[in-house]
């Protein structure tokens, strides 16, 4: 079993309910346990203006699934939640990003590990630091140092 981390985000419909439902689905994946999950956070959208705020969280998984197989499951959960791939960084019912999968490094047309934007997004790093405070980010060092080095980004617990 390898440790994998998944970022969850939603800003359409009932975002908090969609994130909770996705976390439940992650816990039911084959060969997979969900030993930790962050609380829910609110953050401003990264993409086009006029979107509602995002609800974000991060889940830690222990999984026997290979990275591409796990990605397939994540995309199926997104589709079941109504995700339609369209505008980059546009509003969505559910977004699941595979951040890390053990020490695996992949760079192909379907998957890039570690996630290429992992070290640049406070709305991912803050919930990730909550559940993995000692995590070393590949190429960036301790998560706490990376988080402290990023420009201020408004993120708060989801109310």
Image: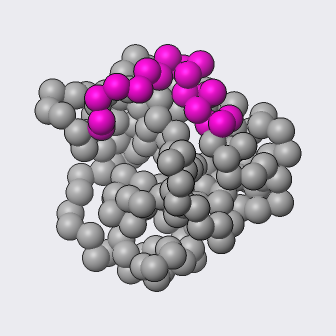
In the image, residue 88 lies at what x, y percent?
30, 36
Position of 141 relative to 137 (above/below) = below
Residue at 30% over, 37% down: 89
Residue 28 falls within the magenta-colored stretch: no
Instruction: Tell which residue pokes out farthest to the front in this image.
Output: 109
* Quadrant, the C terminus: top left
Residue at 59% over, 67% down: 105
In the image, residue 36 lies at what x, y percent?
67, 53
Q: Is residue 54 visible?
A: yes
In the image, residue 17 lies at what x, y percent?
52, 24
The stretch in magenta equals: 72-89
Residue at 68% over, 52% down: 67
Q: Is residue 23 visible?
A: no
In this view of the protein, which residue sits in the foreground, 52 or 109?
109
Query: In which quarter of the view is residue 45 placed?
Result: top left
Position of 65 relative to 135 (above/below) = above
Is residue 73 left or right of 150 when viewed as pictured? right
Query: In which quarter of the view is residue 70 placed?
Result: top right
Residue at 65% over, 67% down: 104
Residue 79 falls within the magenta-colored stretch: yes
* Quadrant, the N terminus: bottom right
In this view of the protein, which residue sits in the foreground, 19 or 68?
68
């Amino acid at each position: 079993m390898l440790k994998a981390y998944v970022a969850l985000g939603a800003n359409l419909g009932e975002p908090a309910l969609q994130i909770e439902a996705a976390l439940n689905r992650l816990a039911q994946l084959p060969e997979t346990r969900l030993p930790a999950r962050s609380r829910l956070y609110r953050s401003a959208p990264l993409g086009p203006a006029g979107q509602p705020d995002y609800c974000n969280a991060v889940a830690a998984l222990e999984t026997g699934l290979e990275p591409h197989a796990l990605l397939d499951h994540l995309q199926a959960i997104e589709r079941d939640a109504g995700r339609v791939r369209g505008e980059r960084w546009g509003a969505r019912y559910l977004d699941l990003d595979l951040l890390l999968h053990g020490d695996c490094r992949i760079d192909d047309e379907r998957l890039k590990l570690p996630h290429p934007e992992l070290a640049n997004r406070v709305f991912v790093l803050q919930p990730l630091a909550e559940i993995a405070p000692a995590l070393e980010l590949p190429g960036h060092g301790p998560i706490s140092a990376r988080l402290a080095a990023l420009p201020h980004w408004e993120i708060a617990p989801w109310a």
